[in-house]
Amino acid sequence: MIPERLNADPAMPAVIHGARLPWIPSPQAGVDRRPLYRVGGEQARATTLVRYAPGSHFSAHSHAGGEEFLVLEGVFEDEHGRYPAGSYVRNPPGSRHAPGSGEGCMIFVRLRQFHRQDQQRCVVPLNAQGNQLLFASEHERVWLEDLPPGAGIRLANSRGLELLLLQGELTGNDAVLGPLSWMRVPAGTALEIQAGTQGARLWIKDAAPDLGF
């Protein structure tokens, strides 16, 4: 069963090692989930790792509070296009699609967490290496950070930070993170992290939590 409340307080720090979690079946055959953050039932405000088996799909549905996802493996598909691993996609509030995957895929997805004024759809292919801005508005900033071995960064964090480690290892903020580890750092707490001997590649969001959906 998926818990209806998981890391539900945005004012509290949270760390989950996604690669260690069991896959939990969804109501749709062939689609499994690893929840990281969740408030609600099947129509939840949520951050999740989702795995689609080859040939699996969801029926058409809308996203009242928006949806953003990062394709980690395979190819994610809907009627708007095909999104291979290394794609970052934002579907604004009110958007609708029927997602699936012919060959199978894994995505990192955030649901119902858009600011109400965010109505921009975007599809961004990730660069193979180097830092990359993925999206920016007055409400949030999303980017990739590539850290060489042993390098570190410090972010002052006035709004709140969230990160997913894609490759390598990170230490900092009283945690050691491996690939698919997710961290939330509440506003007012600085993020201080250092890459391990293989470096680190991470997805970062700087935004105040929007709880209006």
Image: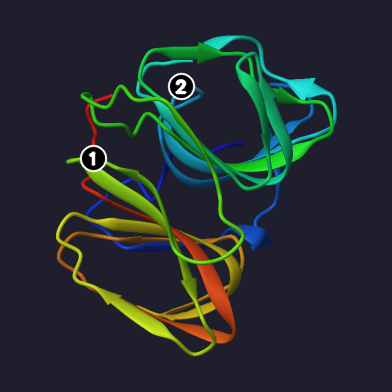
Going from the N terminus, do you reach mark 1 or mark 2 first?
2
Q: Position of residue 208 (x, y in %)?
A: 21, 46
Q: Nearer the viewer, residue 115 or 46?
A: 115
Residue at 30 percent across and 22 percent down: it is 119
Judged left or right of residue 189, residue 100 is right
Judged left or right of residue 58, residue 148 is left
Q: Nearer the viewer, residue 38 or 51?
A: 51
Q: Position of residue 142 (x, y in %)?
A: 36, 50
State which mark lies toward you, 1 or 2: 1
Q: Tell me the quadrant of the picture where the C terminus can be found.
A: top left
Kind of element beneath mark 1: loop
Decide: is 175 above or below 4.
Answer: below
Residue at 14 percent across and 65 percent down: it is 188
Residue at 38 percent across and 51 percent down: it is 7
Decide: is 203 above or below 147.
Answer: above
Q: Nearer the viewer, residue 129 or 30?
A: 129
Kind of element beneath mark 2: loop
- Classify 10 Å Cα crowding around label 2: few (below 14), some (14-19), many (20 and above): few
Residue at 19 percent across and 70 percent down: it is 156
Q: Which residue is mark 1?
A: 137
Decide: is 98 above or below 142.
Answer: above
Tell me if residue 26 can be seen: no
Q: Which residue is mark 2?
A: 43
Q: Position of residue 179 (x, y in %)?
A: 61, 66
Q: Position of residue 4 (x, y in %)?
A: 45, 35
Tell me if residue 163 can be seen: yes
What label does residue 94 carry, if any?
A: none
